[in-house]
């Protein structure tokens, strides 16, 4: 009896998934073709992505994988910067949907001979690639590539931004939002504090564009030398006062100090940073009694975040973020590449 009920529920969940994929919001998203930044999406499209990810997660919990939504379709993972979580989750997401993903080895590709992003995309498109997932050190790499393909034989390729310089990381912000919504139901009125290196953080910038529109009260806290100067926008409060940022926080998203992006002249005093901005159990006192901790990874253990707090299941949502990254990226691929 239990198995039959599970099968019935799985069929219901599958029907719900196809309803989402066939919705007017999904059609609008496919017409946009690309995912370049969260503020290119309207509220309905944002909610569609989150609902689709949640539906795909439920199907996973019912052992309904692999799905067959993208059988015969190809996507390319073009990562010009190192990645573990994002690259791997996109690869797993593609496999879960029945698609074939090709991971471009930049170090041995024609990029090393001077091939442009556009020509790389055109070459991949000629081989049947329908979506190109790109991470690049340039802030505008994904957006410029999408523009460059207009009017060319590669204009039907969907460009998905998997991280662009300091500027944007839309799928990370979406998985962060999904993770917090799962924990509290709604972000309306919730205080979210982003703590750490915001000056060099694409994660901070995408979340600053997403979370206030979802009803969150966003506070950004960094030492003065690591404070983003371009995030002074509606719904965002900026401070260097740690206690102010932590007071009544429902979620604290800790960011890595991004040594690889910083100017050579910037010298960080590790001990001073730990003393004033590291998050650990002792410094949670002013936060909400139900506060949860997030981090986009990788973590500099015992620098921006103590190992003890990072590994404490009472507070940490970090592993949930990693898992949810697969479902968000599945949702993006399904919504952009499914023929409905």
Image (spheres, rainbow, N blue to C red):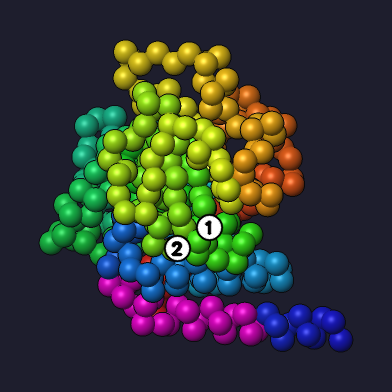
Q: Are marks 2 and 1 in contact (CB under 8 Å)?
A: yes
Q: Secondary structure at mark 1?
A: loop
Position above or below: 259 against 108: above
Q: Which residues are magenta?
A: 11-31
Q: Quadrant of the N terminus?
A: bottom right
Apparent side of residue 230 relative to residue 329 in the rendered image (left or right): left
The front one of 319 and 161 is 319
Q: Main secondary structure of the magenta part?
A: helix
Please name the residue that numbered disc 1 is placed on.
190
Q: Secondary structure at mark 2?
A: loop
- Location of residue 152 (image quadrant): bottom left
Tell me the residue at 43%/41% (across/down). 220
Q: Report the residue that reaches farthest toward the left.
A: 151
Tell me the residue at 57%/20% (across/down). 275
- Location of residue 46 (image quadrant): bottom left
Looking at the picture, how far across and down is residue 50, in whole percent? 50, 66
Visible residue check, residue 143: yes
Q: Earlier in the sequence, mark 2 or mark 1?
A: 1
Is disc 2 surrounded by few (<14), some (14 to 19) or many (20+) residues within 10 Å? Answer: some
Position above or below: 241 against 235: above
> On residue 215, which mark appears?
2
Is disc 1 surrounded by few (<14), some (14 to 19) or many (20+) residues within 10 Å? Answer: many
Apparent side of residue 311 relative to residue 41 in the rendered image (left or right): right
The front one of 65 and 115 is 65
Residue 27 among magenta residues? yes
């Amino acid at each position: 009896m239990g198995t039959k009920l599970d099968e019935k529920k799985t069929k219901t969940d599958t029907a719900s998934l196809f309803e989402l994929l066939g919705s007017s919001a999904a059609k609008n998203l496919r017409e946009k073709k690309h995912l370049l930044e969260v503020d290119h999406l309207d509220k309905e499209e944002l909610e569609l992505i989150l609902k689709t990810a949640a539906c795909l997660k439920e199907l996973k919990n019912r052992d309904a994988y692999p799905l067959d939504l993208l059988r015969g379709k190809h996507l390319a993972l073009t990562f010009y910067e190192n990645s573990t979580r994002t690259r791997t989750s996109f690869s797993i997401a593609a496999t879960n949907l029945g698609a074939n993903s090709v991971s471009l080895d930049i170090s041995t590709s024609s990029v090393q001979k001077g091939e442009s992003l556009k020509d790389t995309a055109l070459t991949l498109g000629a081989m049947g690639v329908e979506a190109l997932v790109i991470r690049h050190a340039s802030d505008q790499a994904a957006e410029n590539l999408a523009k460059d393909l207009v009017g060319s034989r590669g204009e039907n390729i969907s460009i998905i931004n998997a991280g662009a310089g300091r500027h944007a990381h839309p799928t990370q912000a979406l998985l962060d939002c999904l993770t917090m919504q799962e924990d509290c139901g709604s972000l309306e009125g919730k205080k979210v504090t982003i703590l750490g290196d915001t000056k060099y953080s694409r994660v901070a910038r995408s979340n600053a564009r997403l979370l206030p529109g979802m009803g969150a009260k966003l506070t950004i806290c960094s030492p003065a030398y690591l404070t983003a100067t371009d995030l002074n926008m509606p719904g965002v409060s900026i401070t260097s006062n740690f206690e102010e940022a932590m007071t009544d926080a429902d979620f604290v998203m800790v960011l890595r100090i991004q040594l690889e992006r910083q100017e050579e002249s910037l010298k960080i005093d590790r001990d001073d940073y730990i003393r004033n901005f590291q998050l650990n159990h002792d410094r949670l006192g002013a936060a909400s009694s139900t506060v949860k901790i997030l981090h986009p990874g990788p973590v500099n253990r015992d620098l921006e975040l103590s190992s003890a707090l990072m590994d404490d299941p009472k507070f940490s949502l970090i592993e949930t973020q990693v898992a949810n990254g697969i479902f968000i990226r599945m949702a993006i691929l399904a919504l952009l590449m499914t023929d409905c």
